[in-house]
Image (cartoon, rainbow, N blue to C red):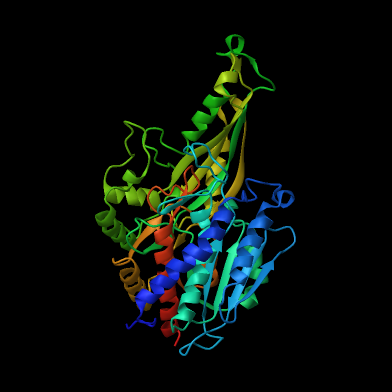
């Protein structure tokens, strides 16, 4: 397969480098400083106005790019977060017809909350450029996506390439589980049209040495589990031994769904058979990366749950897990008296194998946690959000070859493929809506980038190289519909 992009790779590299440094990064830095938390974490987002600030900032930058035929609209459905929609008609001497299957490029600009533990001089809303890294919340997850998408299109047009019809969607509720996105996809269905390729820039990368494609995404269910045993706190010396501890009630309930020694999720309905191809890809990835546990900041003496590098990858991508991510009813240590507390609440986050339906899993979890509670405690499980995972369709030969060539040209190494442990609800929805589409799910969230946590950063060189790779794939997609 011959490349469809101009052979002057050096000139393109120079353009991408200058465009990122001079045009994109200054605006992305301003974006990082905006505390535009997703609605799940900021229910008063409308009143605070930060989401509108972020949308306006990104939309203004995109609108000003010298891209032939670009049109941009900020779509605002009643009661929902806004969405930036960009449409770009076919371009170039080999451009396909306007009614040929197009390309949908996706990103989001809402953010996770602050979290504690940022290093001195860093903070979620304090953008800091330190060498190759731009620190701060949202630069890598996923503010950079709009900039990379448009600069890739601009590179195609500047350097003699062709592309098909393009639609760029930048949403603002992904970190809340994308509750607003289905309404927008329905509302804009005629403008989205037929899609032959989806490019999503909200995923991860195993290292910063090559283009990584995501083969699968885990699903998730989350919710608040609460056990009430009293109407008010009482003296622990007077009541303990008679009144059951609400914490112990929750501990017993959790043992119904998770082995407390191994961490294995117990209900069979939350497991799925791992396809042989995904096991083979895990072996290939392990050969490149070694034990992925090395990327995590373990405290001294702590060991990973599994040691084998292949099993570590499969545990993170195809096996169910439970994490307790928050608690209620527990006073701070300095404020804790000798009181048997009236209730304990825990925020639970289950990660599901890509092919397990979230609704069915949620029903199983809710039944196991709430039926016949210990001591007759008043127990509730309030589901917060859920999303079924995604397993990629077979990779088309043109996309396999295109990503390999792009990765070799921009990174100097062939592309690699692996599953991711996180969720992108949009992918499952699109997979159902466009069953014939190909998917390039990729991103810049590599080792130590720490999305959702403290010290999150964007690896700037990877963002630049990924921009070039997307430009190559957009150009090669023309042949796939020709």
Residue 18: x, y in percent?
45, 67
- Residue 22 seen by the camera: yes
| Viewport quadrant of the C terminus | bottom left
Task: Tell me: 465 left or right of 191.
Answer: left
Relative vertical location of residue 310 with respect to residue 298 in this rendering, above or below? below
Judging depth in this view, the residue of 302 and 111 nearest the camera is 111
Judging depth in this view, the residue of 131 and 252 nearest the camera is 131
| Viewport quadrant of the N terminus | bottom left
Residue 416: x, y in percent?
32, 63
Residue at the image point whose x is 46% and y is 41% from the top: 322
Task: Tell me: 319 left or right of 326.
Answer: left
Residue at the image point whose x is 28% and y is 60% from the top: 280
Judging depth in this view, the residue of 470 and 292 nearest the camera is 470
Relative vertical location of residue 331 with respect to residue 17 in this rendering, above or below? above
Q: How many marks?
A: 0
Residue 89: x, y in percent?
57, 82
């Amino acid at each position: 397969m011959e490349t469809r992009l101009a052979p002057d790779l050096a000139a393109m590299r120079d353009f991408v480098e200058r465009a990122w440094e001079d045009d994109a990064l200054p605006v992305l830095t301003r974006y990082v400083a905006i505390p535009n938390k997703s609605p799940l974490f900021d229910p008063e987002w409308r009143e605070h106005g930060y989401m509108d600030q972020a949308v306006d900032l990104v939309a203004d930058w995109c609108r000003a790019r010298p891209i032939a035929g670009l049109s941009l609209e900020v779509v605002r459905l009643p009661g929902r977060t806004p969405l930036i929609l960009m449409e770009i008609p076919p371009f170039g001497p080999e451009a396909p017809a306007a009614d040929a299957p197009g390309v949908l490029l996706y990103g989001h600009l809402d953010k996770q909350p602050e979290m504690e533990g940022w290093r001195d001089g860093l903070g979620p809303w304090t953008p800091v450029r330190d060498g190759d890294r731009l620190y701060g919340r949202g630069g890598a997850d996923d503010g950079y996506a709009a900039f990379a998408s448009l600069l890739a299109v601009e590179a195609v047009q500047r350097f003699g390439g062709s592309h098909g019809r393009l639609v760029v969607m930048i949403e603002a509720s992904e970190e809340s589980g994308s509750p607003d996105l289905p309404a927008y996809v329905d509302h804009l269905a005629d403008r989205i049209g037929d899609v032959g390729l989806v490019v999503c820039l909200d995923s991860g990368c195993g290292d910063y040495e090559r283009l990584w494609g995501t083969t699968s995404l885990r699903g998730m269910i989350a919710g608040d589990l609460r056990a009430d045993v009293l109407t008010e706190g009482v003296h622990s010396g007077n009541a303990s031994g008679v009144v059951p501890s609400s914490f112990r009630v929750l501990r017993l309930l959790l043992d119904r769904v998770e082995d407390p020694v191994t961490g294995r999720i117990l209900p069979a309905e939350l497991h799925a058979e791992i396809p042989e191809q995904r096991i083979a890809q895990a072996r290939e990835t392990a050969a490149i990366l070694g034990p992925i546990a090395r990327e995590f900041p373990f405290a001294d003496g702590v060991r990973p749950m599994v040691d084998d590098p292949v099993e570590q990858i499969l545990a993170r991508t195809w096996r169910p897990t439970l994490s307790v991510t928050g608690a209620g009813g527990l006073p701070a240590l300095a404020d804790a008296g000798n009181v048997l507390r009236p209730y304990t609440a825990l925020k639970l986050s289950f990660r599901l194998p890509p092919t397990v339906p979230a609704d069915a899993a949620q029903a199983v979890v809710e039944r196991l946690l709430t039926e016949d509670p210990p001591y007759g405690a008043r127990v509730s499980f309030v589901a917060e959000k859920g999303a079924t995972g995604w397993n990629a369709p077979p990779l088309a030969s043109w996309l396999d070859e295109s990503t390999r060539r792009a990765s070799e040209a921009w990174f100097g190494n062939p592309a690699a493929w692996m599953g991711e442990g996180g969720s992108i609800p949009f992918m499952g929805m699109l997979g159902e809506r466009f069953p014939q589409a190909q998917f390039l799910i990729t991103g810049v969230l590599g080792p130590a980038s720490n999305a959702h946590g403290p010290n999150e950063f964007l690896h700037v060189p990877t963002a630049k190289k990924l921009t070039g790779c997307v430009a190559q794939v957009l150009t090669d997609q023309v042949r796939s519909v020709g």
